[in-house]
């Protein structure tokens, strides 16, 4: 599919207004579309989920049809998009500013219907999921010439830093987050779960919209690497029980009847001969940024585990807790050579 010869110059055009309105949840639901901002997120959407991307918009230097794309990184992504059949539109800097102030020269419009649906092998049964998989990075590579114009070819993209499907699923974990409300936190924990090789992420109960542009930016592309499901609390526990997935709650205090185990003790037990093999792949559940997990939620989990604090800080924030626990558990699983079933 060719790049559009026309440069879109009118910030008040109906098409531009609709794209800009995707920052609003009601508009996303009305049009069935969502906005992806910035080179990193757009690149991962194009490479990992080209089936989701409907249009790419890039800033150009001028308003003539042959105006070059302003940023080399954006031009390379535009070439990759063209090779996967995605329509690319040239727009002026003024038009881009109307769409997004966080674009860094490139945005994409995604299809909500294509993004929400398949459980991608995690056996959702309930809720919704974004689908996605890291090994979808089979888009044709592209680039730019010395003038910053789009160049595209038939080479296959192959980025070893993203690993393969077996390496990603080695821990077998699923990360879950209950009533996460802050967009930056939500995006960051998706990125952390991706880095830890989790098979999926679950947003439980009343959480922020995962298609909020701030969430997508904070994932740095990880939203397009692994399934992200949404469930109500009862659905979540039914899903975990039906899938024989033990739920481990990350909580510093526990309840009056159940004190938390220390994460180092849990990992030490896993390190014993065959210790980790006796543990089914868990779902690790984290709580709300301010309130943690409610007692009635903690009463339904299999184990409660806390991260020890050795200094004088009262607590860790959500993103730090998720990073420490998920990465520690993932490293223990990889060290033991454990693989997801």
Image: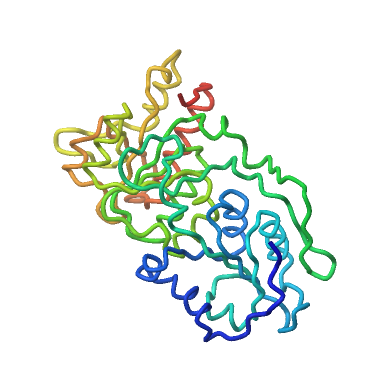
**Residue 212 at what x, y percent from top left?**
42, 63
Residue found at the very far top of the displayed protein: 273
33 vs 14: above or below: above
- The quadrant the C terminus occupies is top left
- The quadrant the N terminus occupies is bottom right
Residue 97 is left or right of residue 159, and the answer is left
* Front residue of 308 and 177: 177
For residue 5, what is the image quadrant? bottom right
**Residue 113 at what x, y percent from top left?**
43, 55
Who's the residue at 76% across and 74% down the image? 68
**Residue 157 at what x, y percent from top left?**
71, 46
Residue 162 is left or right of residue 5, and the answer is left
Who's the residue at 51% across and 61% down the image? 110
**Residue 263 at what x, y percent from top left?**
37, 33
117 vs 32: above or below: above
Who's the residue at 72% across and 74% down the image? 70
């Amino acid at each position: 599919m060719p790049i559009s010869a026309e440069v879109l110059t009118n910030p008040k055009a109906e098409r531009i207004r609709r794209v800009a309105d995707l920052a609003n949840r009601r508009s996303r639901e009305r049009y069935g579309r969502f906005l992806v901002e910035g080179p990193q997120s757009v690149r991962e959407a194009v490479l990992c989920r080209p089936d989701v991307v409907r249009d790419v918009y890039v800033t150009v230097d001028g308003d003539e049809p042959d105006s070059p794309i302003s940023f080399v990184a954006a031009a390379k992504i535009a070439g990759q998009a063209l090779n996967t059949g995605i329509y690319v539109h040239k727009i002026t800097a003024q038009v881009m500013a109307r769409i997004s102030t966080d674009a860094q020269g490139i945005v994409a419009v995604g299809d909500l219907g294509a993004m929400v649906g398949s459980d991608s092998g995690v056996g959702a049964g309930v809720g919704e999921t974004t689908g996605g998989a890291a090994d979808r990075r089979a888009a044709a590579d592209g680039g730019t010439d010395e003038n910053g114009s789009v160049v595209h070819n038939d080479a296959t993209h192959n980025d070893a830093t993203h690993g393969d499907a077996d390496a990603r699923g080695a821990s077998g974990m699923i990360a879950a987050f209950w009533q996460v409300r802050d967009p930056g936190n939500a995006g960051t924990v998706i990125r952390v779960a991706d880095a830890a090789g989790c098979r999926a992420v679950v947003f439980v109960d009343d959480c922020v919209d995962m298609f909020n542009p701030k969430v997508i930016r904070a994932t740095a592309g990880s939203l397009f690497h692994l399934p992200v499901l949404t469930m109500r609390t009862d659905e979540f526990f039914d899903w975990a029980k039906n899938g024989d997935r033990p739920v481990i709650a990350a909580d510093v205090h526990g309840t009056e009847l159940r004190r938390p185990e220390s994460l180092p003790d849990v990992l030490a037990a896993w390190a014993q001969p065959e210790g980790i093999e006796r543990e089914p792949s868990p779902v690790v559940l984290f709580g709300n940024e301010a309130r943690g997990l409610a007692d009635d939620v903690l009463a339904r989990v299999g184990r409660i585990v806390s991260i020890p604090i050795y200094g004088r800080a009262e607590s860790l924030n959500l993103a730090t807790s998720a990073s420490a626990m998920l990465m520690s558990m993932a490293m223990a699983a990889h060290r033991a050579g454990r693989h997801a079933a």
